[in-house]
Amino acid sequence: MHDQKTLKAGEMFTIIGLFIGMKVTDTTPTLFAQKSQNALWLTPLVSFLVILPSFLILLYLLKKAQNKNLIELMESLIGTKLGKSLGFLIFLSSFLLMGLDSRSYVEQIKLLYFPESPTTVLFFLFLCIAFFGAKKGLEVIGFTAKISFPFIKISALILALLISVEIVWQRIFPIFGSGLSTILKEGALKGSIFSEFFLLTIAYTSFKDTKHFRTGTFFGVLVVMIEITFFFYVYATVFDYNSIEKASFPFHDITQYVQLGEYFANIETFFMVFWLLAGFVRFIIYLYLITWIFGAVFNISEFEPLLLPISFLALIVGMIPDNSVINELLYRDTLLNYVTPLFVVFPVILWVVALSRGALKR
């Protein structure tokens, strides 16, 4: 990997905006609505609050270490063997989540544009685009995210303005949906929906200055959480509580409500173009980061050749579920629940070890 360290806070901000912000357009709202119902807009806030302390601890440790990325930090604190084992667990869990997430996007593409095409063929083409994009390297990925970010977010803003006439704010009541305990439980279990924050720390030393990484992260996290909460609120108030849990692809469904007069038919196509672009950028970032983590775990500095086999394995994992319902409500739901403790606990363990060794006094 030839790291030129040209990335700045702007690239980090836009990477987060597309990498994590795209959760408003996938099946995550549907997953939360299964139990939280019309209170699905509150659940990601709980998930974020569950994962935030651990992420802040990790950023603090990286700041203290100054010139180490995620894997190097773990190896320096808990030893090479334990550090690599933990790094491999992070890779494996993230790889499985990427495979299942990409299957959800492929199912949407199939439903919208190619209903008669085999899912395997569409999945293969989707990952081919992600592979060729990831091969360009982090600098090009950051530049692509920075260039495409305004167009994608402006289209989302236009959609929000046009759909506002369909919002019935009374539908958020009862405010806690199926119950406060349910929201807290689901939010806590699904904290790993924000596991991508931790993956980004593998690139901590790849910025012109680590301060750029932290600054871009701060503003990126702030904006993306506002965006996720707002769009989940839109879903909850456009659909009633009986239909929200049955909306497989809420983002696509609300585009069907948009009307610009009888001369502008199929206006949803305009928004889906930018959705496709954002989806491709997101999985380019996803594929690159998890491959980088794998390379760091096994001391492979030139990890780009691994992008192809990891893409192929992601195709195999994504094709395991029989359909999108099983993929979302069984495999992805279960995996998110099991992975959450890993991302909540490991930064705390690193912090305790660093504290006991006096590494935080340096």
Image (spheres, rainbow, N blue to C red):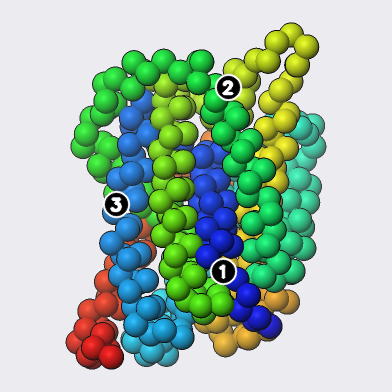
Find out whether the residues at labels 2 and 3 contact each other: C-beta distance under 8 Å: no
Which structural element holds mark 3? helix
Residue at mark 3 to residue at mark 1: CA–CA distance: 27 Å
- Residues marked 1 and 2 touching at CB (< 8 Å): no
Q: Residue at x 64, y 43 (%)?
A: 152
- Can you say whether 53 is above or below 264 in the image? below
Q: What is the residue that sits farthest to the top in this orientation?
A: 262
For residue 362, side relative to residue 155 (left or right): left
Quadrant location, the N terminus: bottom right
Residue 144 in the image: above or below residue 307: above
Task: Point out which mark residue 162 bears.
Answer: 2
Q: CA distance from mark 1 to mark 2?
A: 34 Å
Disc 2 crowd, CA 10 A, few/some/many (<14, 14-19, 20+): some
**Any part of residue 327 in sight:** no
Mark 2 lies on a secondary structure that is helix
Percent position (x, y) of residue 326?
53, 40
Q: Amino acid at mark 1?
A: Lys
- Pick the quarter of the image with the C terminus: bottom left
Report which residue position mark 3 lands on. Answer: 49
Residue 37 placement (x, y as % from top left): 36, 27
Label 3 Cα crowd, 10 Å radius (few <14 / some 14-19 / many 20+): few
Q: Residues within 10 Å of mark 1 (few under 14, many from 20)?
A: many
User: Counting residues from the N terminus, which is met first, the one under dot 1 or under dot 2?
Assistant: 1
Residue 56 place in picture, x, y as percent: 32, 66
The Cα–Cα distance between marks 2 and 3, rounded to whole angstroms, is: 31 Å
